[in-house]
Image (cartoon, grey):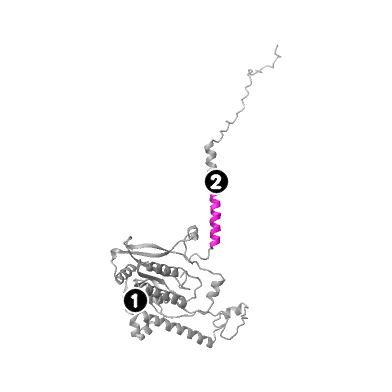
Amino acid sequence: MDQPPQPEGFSQPPLRPEIVPEPIHAPPRRKSGFFVRLFWAVILLGLLGSAALNLLLFAVVGFTGFGSLQDGKQVQEKYHSLNRHGRDKVAILSIEGAIMSGEGFFREQIEHAKRDAEKGNLKAIVVRVNSPGGTITGSDYMLHHLRELAETADIPMVVSMGGMAASGGYYVSMCVGDTPSSIFAEPTTWTGSIGVLIPNFNFAELMERWGIRDNTISSGPLKTMGSFARKMTPEEKLVFQALVDDGFNQFKDVIKQGRPKFRDNPAALSKIATGQIFTANQALVNGLVDKIGFVEDAIDRAISLAGLYKENVKVVEYKAQPNLSDILFGQTRAQPSFDLAAILEATTPRAYYLCTWLPAFARSAN
C-alpha cells in the first residue's frame, strides 16, 4: 500500500513492535511447617497455664490474708557460727523493734526453744535485744516468758544488746537474773532510759477553731480522762501520775532482781533512773551492763556458763520461716497499720516503757 504524501521536513520514526511487560506475581507463601505450629502451641499452653497458676496463687493469698504476715510464723533455724555439725546447740533468740503485745514471732521462738530443750539439744540461749521498748504489758510479758524458759529448761541465758536496748528493751534484758557477766553491750549501744510515760496530747483549741465539739457521754468524770478533746484536769493528772509511779517502781524492782548491785544500793539506781539514755561506756560505769562486746562475746560467755566445748557447739539463729505472701511479694517486716483498730489503740491512754516522744502508731511483730 502506497504511503500518503508527507509534508516536507517530516520524518516518521521507525515502527517498533510494542513490548507489553508480563505481570509480576509475588512468590508463593511457604506454608508453616509442623514444628513451627507445635512451637506456638506450646507457647500458648504455657501462657494459659501460667495465668491459671497465678489465679490459684492469688486465691490462696486472698484466703490466707495479707494482714498477718508476721503473726503465727514458724521458726526456722539458720546456722550462725562454730561447728555446723556440733551436737550441742546455742540459740540466738531475737527481740527487735517496738514491743507491743509480746505475742507473735517472739512467742513462737519461746515455744520452739522449749521443744528443743526438751529434746536435750539446746544448751544455752543468747537473747539479742535491739529495741527502744514499748508497752509495760508487752515488756513484762516477754520478761516473764524468758525467765520461765531459762528456769524450766535449766539452761543459762545471756543478753547481747544491739544498737538500742532502752526502756522496755532494758527491762527484758533483766531475764539473766543474778548470772554474773551476762549482759553485753556493743560499743555503739544506747541503753538505759529507765522510766515510764503516758503520751497525751490536747487538741481542744484546734477543734474549737474547726468548729468541732466533743459530745462524749460517760458514766463518770474520770471515764474520759486523757481525752485529747479537752485539757487535763488536776484530778486526772494525779490519777495518771499514780499509774506512772506504780509502773516506775515495778521497773526498778525488776532491775534490782537482775542487777544485784542496785539491790544492795537502791540510791545508786534512783540516781540513774531519770529516763536518761546512756552510751555503752556510760552504762558500764553505772553498772547497767557487765561487758562491752559483740554477739560473739556473748556466745562465748553462754558456752562457758553451760560448760560446753566450742568445737562441739553449733550456734543457730531463730528466723521467721517465709510464708506464701513473702515468696510472692518479698519478705517484709511488719508494716504500719493505720486501720481503725490501730487508731483506737494509739489514742487510748497507755503507759509505756519506751524511749520516744510520740505514742506508737504502728503495730509490731513482737
Residue in view at x 40 percent, y 65 percent: 318
Residue 80 pos. (x, y %): 35, 63
Task: Establish if 159 lies above or below 37.
Answer: below
User: Farthest front residue?
Assistant: 119
Q: Which mark is residue 45?
A: 2
What distance separates the C-alpha of mark 2 from that of mark 1?
64 Å
Camera-side mark, 2 or 1: 2
State the quadrant of the N terminus: top right
Disc 2, SS: helix
Looking at the picture, how far across and down is residue 161, in whole percent? Answer: 37, 72
Dominant SS of magenta comes to helix
Mark 2 or mark 1: name the one nearer the start of the chain: 2
Residue 196 lies left or right of residue 236; in this view the side is left
Q: Which residue is mark 1?
A: 289
Residue type, label 2: Leu
Instruction: Give the left or right position of residue 60, taking residue 186 as reference.
Output: right
Q: Position of residue 134 (x, y in %)?
A: 46, 75
Asked whether residue 56 is drawn in magenta, I would say yes
Q: Quadrant of residue 154?
A: bottom left
Image-based side of 7 in relation to 189, left or right = right
Q: Residue at x 47, y 80 (%)?
A: 197
What's the magenta region?
47-64
Nearer to the camera, 61 or 240: 61
Asked if residue 274 can be seen in this view, the reply is no
Q: Disc 1 residue type?
A: Val
* Vertical side of 111 occupied by 324: above or below: above
Instruction: State the SS at label 1.
Output: loop
Which quarter of the figure has residue 190?
bottom left
Determine crowd level at label 2: few under 14, some 14-19, many 20+ residues with C-alpha closer than 10 A: few
Residue 115: x, y in percent? Answer: 40, 67
Q: Say if mark 2 contacts mark 1, CB within 8 Å.
A: no
Q: Residues within 10 Å of mark 1 (few under 14, many from 20)?
A: many
